[in-house]
Image: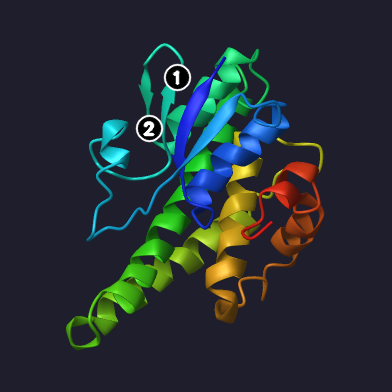
Amino acid sequence: MKLSLYWSPASPFVRKVMVAAHELGLGLDGTIETLESAANPVERDARIKAFNPLAKVPAAQAGDGTALYDSRVICEYLDAETGGRLFPPAGPARWTALRRQALADGVLDAALLVRYETVIRPEEHRWPLWIEKQHEKVSDGLDAMEADVPEAECHDIGAISYGCALGWLDFRFGEIGWRDGRSALAEWYAGYETRPAMVATRPGA
């Protein structure tokens, strides 16, 4: 199996794909070819559009030419191609894993909107109420994660998604102190972030 992947080292969604790949034993042997890109919501990178018309990363192309996007699709493709360890089969465990993935991705979506509003949008056009409400979504999502912490032995797509979301909050939003009042989630993450797949994919690693 070969996969070409447009990526950004700072993207939490790209990191989710790379963590999944590491957990599945992919990428280190040249299975995944990473392609440089400069994804931006305003100055869209035309190179990425060859794989994803939305010009967003992660965007991939399989060896047979199949286009794959976004992180959810790419992760499931990698899992299916290697025997299926990260996505549980139909049943309660699957819905839990997919729900956790959706929750973590939603937290990231809201946090990214805050970052775009405060970093990309000109200061005179920023909307404080919008920023406040996105922060509320992040906080509510983190509270839900605190109430639904994965088991220590759980390393499926739900756990991967939690880990990448929390890692990105540390990377970009350290000032929000997401651990405050969320001791169970903080304890889980302290252990999870030491997994080799997480260590190898840290921004700047």
**In the figure, 40 relative to 117: above or below?**
above
Mark carried by residue 69: 2
Q: Within the image, what quadrant is residue 64 found in?
A: top left
- Return the x and y of residue 34 as percentages of the image width and height: 52, 38
Disc 1: which residue: 62
Give the amino acid type for the residue marked by disc 1 in the picture. Answer: Ala
- Please report the residue visible at 39 percent of the width from the left and 44 percent of the height from the top: 57
Q: Within the image, what quadrant is residue 66 found in?
A: top left
Give the residue at the far left of this rendering. Answer: 125
- Return the x and y of residue 71 as percentages of the image width and height: 46, 37
Q: Earlier in the sequence, mark 1 or mark 2?
A: 1
Is disc 1 in contact with disc 2, using a CB cutoff of under 8 Å?
A: no
- Please report the residue visible at 41 percent of the width from the left and 71 percent of the height from the top: 136
- Residue depth check, mark 1 versus mark 2: number of the one nearer the observer: 1
Q: Within the image, what quadrant is residue 38 found in?
A: bottom left
Q: Is residue 108 visible?
A: yes
Tally of numbered discs: 2
Q: Secondary structure at mark 2?
A: loop
- The C terminus - image quarter: bottom right
Q: Secondary structure at mark 1?
A: strand
Give the amino acid type for the residue marked by disc 2 in the picture. Answer: Tyr
Horizontal arrangement in the rendering, residue 139 relative to residue 183 (left or right): left
Q: Residues within 10 Å of mark 2 (few under 14, many from 20)?
A: many
- Return the x and y of residue 164 as percentages of the image width and height: 60, 51
The CA span between labels 1 and 2 is: 11 Å
Q: Residues within 10 Å of mark 1 (few under 14, many from 20)?
A: some
